Amino acid sequence: MRVITGSARGRRLGELKGMETRPTTDKVKESIFNCIQFDVADARVLDLFAGTGQLGIEALSRGARSALFVDRRADAVKLIRENLALCRLEENAQVVCGDSIAALGAQSGRFDIILLDPPYGSGLLQQAMEKIVSFDILSPHGIMVAESAADEALPALPPPYGLYREYRYGKIKVSIYHRAGEEEA
């Protein structure tokens, strides 16, 4: 796992031991950021179910204004902090150890980009998407990126949220959602 581009380009990130965390592959991560590359600069980012923190770190490396990382595992939170320090990106980052779904209700303000990569088949992705919509924490014209198993059905979201595109990479599906602007709603 490495940072693909930006200020921390080429830095190798630490990984968690065991099989509980499944990091996004570099190929899928690069594809995600190719899709959202023009929206990252100066964005406020939420990396939910952060694991190693690599998605939020990639966003910070590419010029995101700030990133909030949330994971329930203490070892993941420790590793995220280590990876941020390795990349010298800790100044614009906040790391929270806690339940990701509960953390959604505790947010003030909105995010420009929300990155969702929970354990596949856990139902957490659907719960998170529904909470994001109900709390309306995605900015107008914001982007939500959801990584799931290719065969996993994701909920249809009500306006102003909508599915923009889906991409498949073998057994992985990346779904990109947009939130309409206030003038479009």
Image (tube, helix red, strand yellow):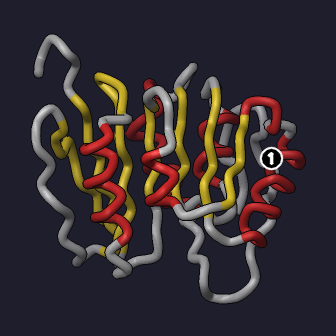
Image point (36%, 34%), residue name? 138
Image point (34%, 58%), residue name? 174
In the image, is residue 63 above or below residue 153?
above
Q: Residue furthest bottom?
A: 18
Is residue 170 visible to the viewer in this orientation of the structure? no
**Res. 24 image quadrant:** bottom right
Nearest the viewer among 68 and 33 is: 68
Is residue 184 visible to the viewer in this orientation of the structure? yes
SS type, badge 1: helix
- The answer to whether 17 appears left or right of 146 in the picture is right
Q: Residue furthest top?
A: 183
Image point (75%, 69%), residue name? 74
Image point (68%, 72%), residue name? 73
**Res. 83 image quadrant:** bottom right
Write down the residue under mark 1.
84
Q: Where does the image place residue 117, in percent across and percent down from the top left?
A: 46, 62
Q: Where does the image place residue 2, in percent across and percent down from the top left?
A: 72, 56
**Quadrant in which the C terminus is drawn:** top left
- The answer to whether 115 appears left or right of 178 in the picture is right
**Quadrant in which the N terminus is drawn:** bottom right
In the image, is residue 108 above or below residue 152?
above
Q: Where does the image place residue 109, in percent across and percent down from the top left?
A: 47, 26
Q: Where does the image place residue 168, in percent across and percent down from the top left?
A: 29, 64
Mark 1 residue type? Leu
- The answer to whether 50 appears left or right of 83 in the picture is left
